[in-house]
Image (tube, grey):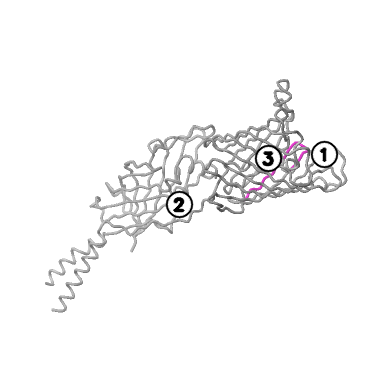
Amino acid sequence: MKKLITYIYILIIPISSFASEYQVDRSKESQIKFISDAPIEEFEGITNNIDGYINLPSFEQLDESQLYFEVDLETLDTGIGLRNRHMRENYLETEKFKYTFFEGVFTSIEEVSEKEYNVKVSGSISIHGVVRSISISGTLIKNEKQLTIVTSFEIALTDFEIDVPELMFMKINEIIKIECTIFTKEIE
Amino acid sequence: MMRSFGKLFFIVFTLFFVYETAAQGTKWKRRIIPNKLKTQLFHSTQSINLPTSETLQKGDLFFEISHRFIPTIKSGSKEFWGFDGPANIRLALGYAFSDNSILTLGRSNLDNNFDLSFKHWLFESKIFSLPVTSSLLIGGSWSSDVNYSYENDFDLFQFYGQLIFNTMIEKKLGIGLVPSYLYNSHIQCETKEYSFTLGSYMQFYFSDMYSFIVEWNPTVTGWREDYNPVSFGFEIETGGHFFKIILTNSSDLNASQFLAGADKKFSDRDLRFGFNIIRIL
């Protein structure tokens, strides 16, 4: 009987210690930035309003992993109030589509150094009410109870049915670069 | 026996706990951020001459160049319907000290008038499910070069206040009401005149880019030049710019001059062309 109990415990303990959920660390400034690099005018929009979680039970069984991040698009700031308003009202239509989100799983995690991993995630991204599948590579930094994700990728506005403005003096690149730094910490 | 039963119970409990944590469920919940966005109705910070309640985002700058061509369209092709000039010109620079306030310094070549104004957001509300926004504008102006004699320098200063109420129907038709008070309306008068006007305007947005504006500023009581100013025209909005091309019976641009009334009768052949260009950066 005693042997059995010990056996079960040996089995349980490793499992339970890996079953972990990380949520966006609200005490740190996670940041998502988009960059439109048109020939005449480059501009960027920034938000720190990122929320979501990572479920990463183990680094081996990745199909059990989960990622979900969302951004409140009303908080995107390009530095000029009128430009923010145009972006919200005419292009992103934030009254209808307030949140943009990514939902997916880790598909590969490769150790680069002690704390740093090259990761690939794949899943779906929703912008402007349009959901598209996407694969993104990035860097994962594991620091005790914290996971930090750093990545950048590109999206095409037309993929998400966002009109590319053709107005005078308004130059936006159809391809938008997105840079993310997301801090998460393990929850109890 | 009791001891091993206790152990078994503990194992079952632990297993259950592990199962729960390992399950795909998440403890994450969306945190609701209070909506900080201000209600914005009109696109521009002014209609034609009268202000809208709109303010800018903290740190934004705007620059205005406006013309009112003095010859009326009556002058015909000989003076290119007024475009040959001369024109009254206003240049202005505004800065948003906060999300709620703009300080604007302007200058018109008419009497070399300088004006300094401060607009502050008051409130937003709903009346019969229509959004209503309100701002207060106060300002003063100084005519630095007049071609007549005057008694003391203070006679050249004018002060004004405007309470602005805006509403918007279906995001298409903006309506504004601007009761305004002007002190020392007529700087040549020996006694200090005042004017109280009830300005109003409507702006219809055909699309994100094009809109039509009508503006009327009748004097309710106090001093007035010959007629009430009436203006109408189109606004084109592109990127950070507003272009307004208008017809009006007034030739004035700076608030202290405009609020005192117009010199031409609003009959179809005695109007002037004018334009405003506002760039927000």
Q: Position of residue B137 (x, y in %)?
A: 67, 49
Q: Residues within 10 Å of mark 3 (few under 14, many from 20)?
A: many
Residue marked by disc 3:
B216
Residue marked by disc 2:
A48
Tell me the chief SS of the magenta region.
strand
Give me the C-alpha separation between circle 1 and circle 3: 28 Å
> Which quadrant would the C terminus of chain B be assigned to in this image?
top right
Residues at marks 1 and 3, common chain?
yes
Relative depth, front residue between B91 and B184: B184
Chain ID, mark 2: A
Q: Secondary structure at mark 2?
A: loop
Which is more foreground, mark 2 or mark 1?
A: 1
Residue marked by disc 1:
B146
Residues at marks 2 and 1, common chain?
no
- Amino acid type at mark 1: Val
Residue under the point 52% across and 37% down: B208
